[in-house]
């Protein structure tokens, strides 16, 4: 019986992993002399349930926060958010001027293929490789 329960949990876990995918994962190269930057991507959710991205981490970054931009009194401000919802059968873009990952206390230079672990409210995490692009 215990073996059956373990197999069901494993099957459930692997089917969840197939529902979340990431595309266009890019980190902006830090401005010279700065040890912070931003990462962008689109998170796709093919599943039937809303998923909430709650954290991100990488061994080459001191911290990574989920951020968004808001307009207050005609001024654009950046602020940390506790979670970003990925709609069921939908996607959420992380783009300049909206949601993004704020990368701080970076160990420079960045790895050739930097990986970020994206973690969701249900405890599942996804390892995602990002590309690095120069500031425009």
Image (tube, grey):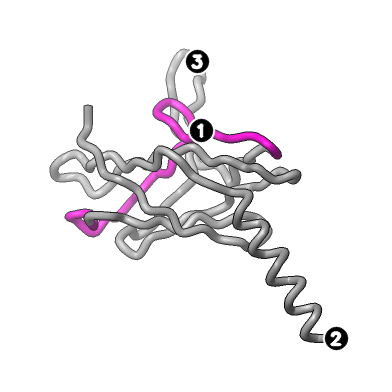
Residue 4 in percent (x, y) is at: 80, 80
**Highlighted magenta segment, given as a residue range:** 88-111
**Tag of residue 1:** 2
Left or right, residue 23 beside residue 46? left
Looking at marks 3 and 2 on the same chain, the residue that comes earlier in the sequence is marked by 2
Task: Say which residue label 1 marks.
Answer: 93
Q: Nearer the viewer, mark 2 or mark 1?
A: 2
Please state which of residues 31 and 91 is positioned toward the viewer in this rendering: 91
Q: Is mark 3 on a helix, strand or loop?
A: loop
Q: Which of marks 1 and 3 is in front?
A: 1
Looking at marks 2 and 1 on the same chain, the residue that comes earlier in the sequence is marked by 2
Left or right, residue 33 beside residue 9? left
Residue 42 in percent (x, y) is at: 49, 37
Left or right, residue 102 beside residue 49? left
Distance between the Cα atoms at labels 3 and 2? Answer: 61 Å
Q: How crowded is mark 2: few (under 14 residues within 10 Å), some or many (20 or more)?
A: few
Q: What element carries label 2?
A: loop
Distance between the Cα atoms at labels 2 and 1? Answer: 42 Å
| Residue found at the far left of this picture | 32
Residue 44 in percent (x, y) is at: 57, 40
Please state which of residues 39 and 77 is positioned toward the viewer in this rendering: 39
């Amino acid at each position: 019986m215990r073996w059956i329960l373990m197999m069901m949990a494993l099957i459930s876990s692997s089917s969840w992993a197939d529902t979340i995918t990431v595309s266009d994962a890019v980190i902006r190269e830090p401005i010279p002399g700065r040890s912070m930057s931003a990462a962008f991507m689109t998170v796709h959710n093919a599943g039937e349930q809303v998923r909430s991205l709650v954290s991100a981490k990488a061994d080459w970054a001191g911290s990574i926060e989920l951020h968004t931009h808001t307009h207050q009194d005609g001024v654009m401000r950046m602020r940390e958010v506790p979670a970003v919802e990925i709609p069921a059968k939908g996607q959420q873009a992380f783009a300049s001027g909206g949601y993004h990952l704020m990368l701080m206390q970076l160990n420079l230079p960045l790895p050739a293929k930097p990986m970020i672990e994206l973690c969701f409210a249900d405890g599942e995490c996804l390892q995602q490789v990002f590309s690095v692009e120069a500031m425009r």
